[in-house]
Image: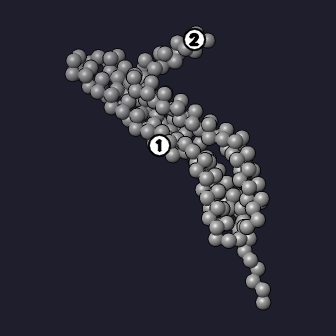
Amino acid sequence: MIEFFEAIRDFTETGGQVLLVIGFLIFVMWMLILERVLYVFVWHKNYKRSVLAQWQARNDRSSWNAEQIRQKAISDLMLSLNGSIPIIQALVALCPLLGLMGTVTGMIEVFDVMAISGSGNARSMASGVSKATIPTMAGMVGALSGVFASTWLSRTVKTERTHLEDAIQIQRPVASR
């Protein structure tokens, strides 16, 4: 276990301070993703059942007022279902940008070494190159994993909206001839 933490410490030292920020960002993003997944699979079903029960208990399901109540119920369910998805999508977009910032800071270190010792000190330049590439890789890995999760969540929300609109139907009066 100690070796594991030492490997993580060495990795973060090699990647620089930006890597810590990227790691924290990815951690927050995945906590929000897990919260949304739990909401979809556990809490949303109970909320949906209660809204459907309230709709079925209504006597009036065909008037303009009933249509407005239906739209409000669907909107409330969608707001609660969307939750933190926009924040997750923003964090996904931020990951590669922070990786790029790590690239820039690492390259600045390379140029500093070149300015001080010339281009002959390859060991010092390698340290800056690793500080440039590791945050880029971490930002891209975090963004890719978050893209898949946020796409799945967005698709699930759209599917659930369709199911809700079908489940909460307006009863149209039948025209008699």
Question: Is residue 92 found left or right of 115 in the rendered image?
Answer: right
- Using the image, tell me which numbered label, if any, was put on residue 152: none
- Residue at 72 percent of width and 67 percent of height: 61
Name the element at disc 2. Answer: helix
Q: Hey, which residue is sitting farthest bottom in the picture? A: 177
Question: Is residue 71 found left or right of 41 in the rendered image?
Answer: left
- Residue 6, horizontal then vertical, whole percent: 52, 12
Label 2 neighbour load within 10 Å: few <14, some 14-19, many 20+? few
Looking at the image, is 67 positioned above or below residue 103? below
Looking at the image, is mark 1 or mark 2 earlier in the sequence?
2
Looking at the image, is 55 positioned above or below residue 15? below
Q: In which quadrant is the C terminus drawn?
A: bottom right
Looking at the image, is 167 positioned above or below residue 32? below
Q: Which amino acid, mark 2?
A: Glu
Q: Nearer the viewer, residue 125 or 63?
A: 63
- Residue at 34 percent of width and 26 percent of height: 106
Q: Which amino acid, mark 1?
A: Ala
Q: Which residue is mark 1?
A: 90
- Residue 90, horizontal then vertical, whole percent: 47, 43
- Tell me which corner region of the image, top left, top right, bottom left or bottom right, holds residue 117: top left
- Residue at 76 percent of width and 54 percent of height: 53
- Residue 144, horizontal then vertical, whole percent: 53, 40
Question: Is residue 109 found left or right of 141 in the rendered image?
Answer: left
Q: Which residue is mark 2?
A: 3
Number of disc labels:
2
| Residue 66 in sight | yes
- Tell me which corner region of the image, top left, top right, bottom left or bottom right, holds residue 133: top left
